[in-house]
Amino acid sequence: MSPLHPTQVDTELELHLVVPDAGTVPLRVTLSYTTEDPFAVTAAFAGDGLTIEWVFARDLLIGGLDGPTGEGDVHVWPSWGSGRDLVLLSLTSPDGHAVLEADATDLRGFLQRTLDLVPEGTESAHVDVDTELATFFA
């Protein structure tokens, strides 16, 4: 990666796992965004010797800063009930369900760095459709 032309944005955030009747539990996550997959953000949760990755649309996080968004396994929405500017992420898999709190300012900062790299609406200009199709059909 060239410092003059970055192709990836990474940041480590502290999220909080919401535990019913017990408050929250801090959880470190690394968010990654790359021009190689300009529509997606990867969230990597590491612990106990393993890493679990979730990949979801960048637009989902952007939309979730201002209002509820998502369907299926991932939902994102803003929350001000605690007096803090938070974004909640709901993740559902066959193994369970988790609700995570993220500081909206931290998330907004990460997303702004991704938008500086690939502005909204220009994602498809970063995708080599011929290569993607060749990989898909190989």
Image (cartoon, rainbow, N blue to C red):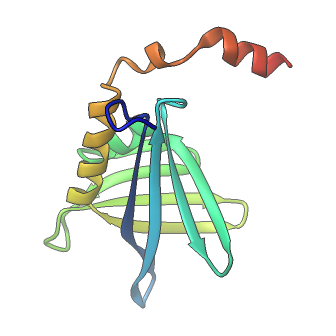
Residue lying at the far right in this picture: please name it: 138
Residue closer to the observer: 55 or 80? 55
Where 124 sits versus 6, above or below? above
Residue lying at the far top in this picture: please name it: 130
Q: Which residue is drawn at 45% across and 72% down?
A: 28
Residue closer to the observer: 49 or 88? 49
Residue closer to the observer: 130 or 1? 1
Q: Residue at x 72, y 14 (%)?
A: 133
Whether residue 47 sits left or right of residue 35 in the image: it is right
Query: Total marks drawn?
Result: 0
Residue lying at the far bottom in this picture: please name it: 22
Q: Where is residue 80? Give x, y as percent.
A: 18, 64
Q: Where is residue 52? Give x, y as percent.
A: 64, 63
Q: Residue at x 37, y 45 (%)?
A: 61
Q: Where is residue 74? Give x, y as percent.
A: 52, 50
Where 133 sits versus 2, above or below? above
Residue lying at the far left in this picture: please name it: 83
Where 25 sits versus 99, above or below? below
Whether residue 74 sits left or right of residue 132 in the image: it is left
Q: Which residue is drawn at 86% across and 19% down?
A: 138
Where 65 sits versus 59, above or below? below
Q: Where is residue 66? Give x, y as percent.
A: 23, 44
Residue closer to the observer: 82 or 121? 121
Whether residue 23 sits left or right of residue 127 in the image: it is left
